[in-house]
Image: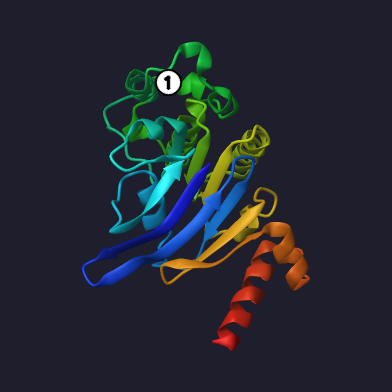
Amino acid sequence: MIAIQHLSKRFGKLTVLNDVCLTLQGGHCVALIGPNGSGKTTLIKSILGMVVPQSGKITVKGKDIANEWQYRNRIGYMPQIGRYPENMSIGQVLDMMKDIRKIPESALDKELFVAFGLNGMLDKRMRTLSGGTRQKVSACLAFLFNPEVLILDEPTAGLDPLSTELLKDKIITETQRNKLVIITSHVLSDLDDLVSEVIYMQEGKPLFHKSLQSLKTATGTDKLSKAVAQVIAIHELID
């Protein structure tokens, strides 16, 4: 579904993506993890068309995204920090996004709006919302237009335990519908029940891209965090 071929990006003399090659398919939930400064955010922004690489290309369903914008309609994006017009209500933000995307009302996925109880809060102004409620709005908007690809940046940050579980259930459901879900998170325990593949970025390129099961089997562990820690430790010993 998404193919990344020899992608490189520099900011001045700093190389943030270094010849990245990845293939990501529908029906998988992929953890994109790594330390700060490893290139995760730049890679996501490149997929979204917010950053233009110096070399390489990205294709979505076989089509090069360079000088193209329609492909973004296939993607639902949940930023780590959602920024919205403070004077607008939740309902107005929703209407604004529907007007921009021009998707028929019957095609909208409002499941999370109902699950989170936001249907009863549509008149609330964005400036009055708690961080957790803003996060719920961002999650709802990411899923609203039934995208084929979902990119979720620290999706559970600020959510209460019940809302976290509701969001996890939704992610699992959409993955089972053959959608591609990419999640970045520093809380690896949140990913154990969700992801089928793991990409670990380091110094601008993937250190590894493996299935979660093969990673656990190779390391003899039952937790993503333990498996990743072992692989990194082995890599550092080899280096």
Q: Position of residue 166 (x, y in %)?
A: 63, 36
Q: In which image quadrant can residue 86 be found? A: top left
Residue at 40% over, 55% down: 43
Q: On screen, 64 above or below 204?
A: above
Residue 221 appears in the figure: no
Residue at 40% x, 63% y: name it: 39
Q: Determine whether 11 is above or below 94 in the image.
A: below
In this rendering, the count of numbered labels is 1
Residue 135 visible in the shown view: yes
- The amino acid at mark 1 is Leu
Question: Is residue 12 rendered to the left or right of residue 225?
Answer: left
Residue 118 against residue 21 in the figure, above or below: above
Say above or below: 99 vs 200: above
Q: Tell me what residue is drawn at x 53 percent, y 33 percent.
A: 148
User: Is 21 displayed left or right of 168 in the figure?
Assistant: left
Crowding near pointer 1: few (<14 within 10 Å), some, many (20+)? some
Q: Nearer the viewer, residue 15 or 66?
A: 66
25 lies left or right of 40: right
Location of the C terminus by quadrant is bottom right
**Which residue is at a point 58% across and 51% down the rendered structure image?**
30
Query: Residue 175 at x, y = what percent?
Result: 64, 38
Name the outermost residue toward the left: 12
Residue 131 percent location from the top left of the image: 42, 43
Depth check: give the residue in front, 76 or 91.
76
Tag 1 secondary structure: loop
Colour pattern: rainbow
Read off the residue under disc 1: 122
Q: Quadrant of residue 130?
A: top left
- Name the spot of residue 132 as percent of width and height, x first: 47, 41
